[in-house]
Image (cartoon, rainbow, N blue to C red):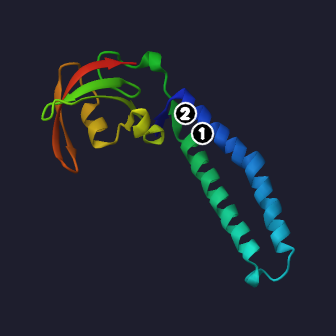
């Protein structure tokens, strides 16, 4: 089971509806048009339409599976004194003295440029359930990072 923010759940739901009710009917029309042009074995337009159809169906099924197995998180029920999903965490890399701020999110919401890391990433996993002042270690590809939690907010 995955946990999503209300915002992300709504975004995925909207994308799914768009694919089902707008994109897929257009894909079907394009496929029928390409199919009507004759021999399918030599028809590049038909092969391309089939490829787009398969890609669209795959994305629809993927989104359906995510939404079916997800629960929306109520931020009011989350603990405020330790790192959990949707927490915004400020921490210091003790080796370099670098301070960073990231929000801990589900893998489907991860966006490094926006400052959101997955709770399943090495740093996200190391920060989970820690309190302000705690020191934790995260094993990353470049080695082990020692991190001290400076603040937690929502």
Foreground residue among 117 and 6 = 117
Nearest to the observer: residue 84 or residue 39: 39
Q: Residue at x 65, y 63 (%)?
A: 54
Measured along the vertical axis of the image, is residue 48 above or below residue 128? Answer: below
Residue 45 falls left or right of residue 108? right
Residue 106 in sight in this render:
no
148 left or right, relative to 68: left
Residue at image coords 32%, 42%: 121
Residue 11 or residue 130, whichever sits in front: 11
Q: Which residue is under mark 1?
A: 12
Q: Residues within 10 Å of mark 2 (few under 14, many from 20)?
A: some
Q: Is residue 92 left or right of residue 15?
A: left
Give how far across and how far down residue 126 sits, in percent. 24, 35
Across and down, in percent, residue 73 comes to 49, 26
Spatial distance from mark 2 to mark 1, Cα to Cα? 6 Å
Q: Give the residue number, with chain letter if any, for mark 2.
A: 8
Residue 85 in the image: above or below residue 49: above
Q: Height in image: 100 above or below 14?
A: above
- Residue 110: image quadrant is top left
């Amino acid at each position: 089971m995955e946990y999503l923010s209300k915002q992300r759940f709504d975004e995925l739901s909207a994308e799914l509806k768009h694919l089902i009710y707008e994109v897929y009917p257009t894909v079907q029309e394009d496929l029928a048009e390409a199919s009507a042009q004759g021999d399918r074995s030599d028809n590049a337009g038909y092969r391309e339409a089939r490829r787009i159809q398969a890609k669209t169906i795959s994305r629809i099924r993927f989104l359906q599976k995510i939404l079916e197995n997800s629960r929306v998180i109520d931020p009011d029920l989350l603990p405020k004194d330790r790192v959990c999903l949707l927490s915004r965490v400020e921490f210091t890399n003790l080796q370099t003295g670098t301070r960073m701020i990231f929000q801990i999110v589900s893998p489907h919401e991860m966006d490094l440029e926006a400052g959101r890391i997955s709770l399943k990433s090495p740093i996200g996993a190391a920060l989970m359930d820690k309190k302000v002042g705690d020191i934790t270690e995260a094993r990353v590809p470049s080695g082990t990072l020692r991190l001290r939690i400076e603040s937690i907010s929502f």
